[in-house]
Amino acid sequence: MSKQQIRQLIEAKMHEDGLVDTGVNGVQLFRVTEPVRCTPAVYEPTLVAIVSGTKEAIIDGTSHVYDSSQYMCCAISMPVEAGTPMASPDNPLLGVQIALDPRLMTELAIEMENAAGAIRESQGGPLPKGFALAHWDDDFTEALLRLVQLVDLPTETAVLGEGRLREVYYALLNSEAGAAARRAFGVGNEIARLIEHVSAHLNEEITIEDMAAHVGMSRAVFHRKFKEATTMSPLQFVKGIRLNNAAMKMAGGMTVHEAAMDVGYASPSQFSREFKRAYGQSPKQWSTSAQPLPAG
């Protein structure tokens, strides 16, 4: 019933397609009624909970379709292709998008690890992937409902917003996606911190040796742990982040040359070759046919 209540609150608030801020920092409602093909994007650390319709995210060639039966947690920045190919007026995409605030998530993850008396990943098992789907459970559903109920209540939002956001984060950290989130924000989050560093320095030369040194690992250990976390090799990941960022910049009005330079390509011809190899179109062809990125 709570999930239906969340849907009713979104429907009452949104009468047009797009994103609407709720007043709680990083929390937005979204509505899409037109199909949008999958296009290059970069997922920042985000939680997406759908109450109607479906979304698709393609990561390293693998399609992940999710709907109201599962919510999505992207705990680290990831190059993806994202879209809403099934959205229609009769089957709208409705949901909640929540940015994962690094400060709050880290505080909460470490508090939980300390309360448990041990670091949860200390057994040395494989790193969970940075992208995870989790089934709604009662704790998550109730926490999300309490958060969305603050919409259009500015005083309550100002006083209670961060506390209710922490409740959602807590439910996430205890869910099926919790291992990925704890790895990104708790103790032992070297790969997530490196990805944040790389994303902020795309216009600089980036080598595997530099990345491994940044997290204090040998090249072989770093390569293995990075691929376990992202499914991609480090250089493949960097290329994906660069190309997807460039595609988004071109969709926003940048020229091909400006976008290439902005994400670290010194050679426009190399950028064009790699872009066409990745997306089947030259940058100029893509920029003229690009659709807006879907909400959520």
Image (tube, rainbow, N blue to C red):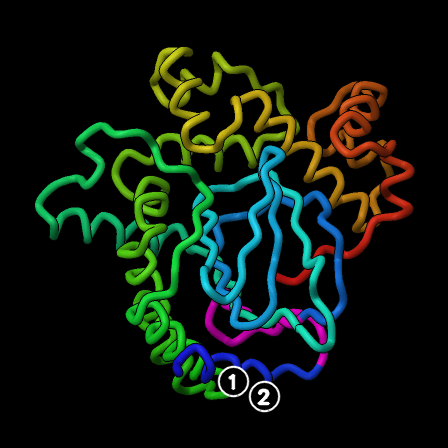
Q: Tag 2, which secondary structure? A: helix
Q: Is residue 272 left or right of residue 217?
A: right
Pointers 1 and 2 in contact (C-beta within 8 Å): yes
User: Is residue 27 rendered magenta in the image?
Assistant: yes
Tell me what residue is drawn at x 58 percent, y 88 percent.
Answer: 12
> What span is in magenta?
16-31
Q: Nearer the viewer, residue 270 or 80?
A: 80
Q: Is residue 52 above or below residue 235?
A: below
The label shown at residue 33 is: none
Tell me where residue 227 appears, x and y as whole percent. Answer: 46, 25
137 vs 165, nearest the viewer: 137
Name the side, left or right, on which 6 lies relative to 56. Answer: left
Q: Is residue 214 above or below residue 283?
A: above
Query: What residue is shown at x 30% (from left), y 71% (from top)?
Result: 138
Q: Quadrant of residue 193?
A: top left
Mark 2 Cα-neighbour bin, 10 Å: few <14, some 14–19, many ≥20: few
In the image, 64: left or right of 109?
A: right
Residue 9 marker: 1
The percent coordinates of residue 127 (x first, y second) are: 34, 32
Mark 1: secondary structure: helix
Q: Name the residue located 47 percent from the left edge and 81 percent from the top edge.
A: 4
Is 84 rendered above or below residue 269? Answer: below
Residue 173 in magenta stretch: no
Q: Amino acid at mark 2?
A: Ala
- Within-10-Å neighbours for mark 1: few <14, some 14–19, many 20+: some
Q: Which quadrant, please, contains the N terminus? A: bottom left
Give the residue type at disc 1.
Answer: Leu
Q: Using residue 68 as the reference point, say whether residue 186 is left or right of it.
A: left
Residue 263 lies, in percent from the top left, at: 69, 32
Residue assigned mark 2: 12
Residue in the image at 34% along x and 53% along y: 105
Between 134 and 239, the residue placed more toward the observer is 134
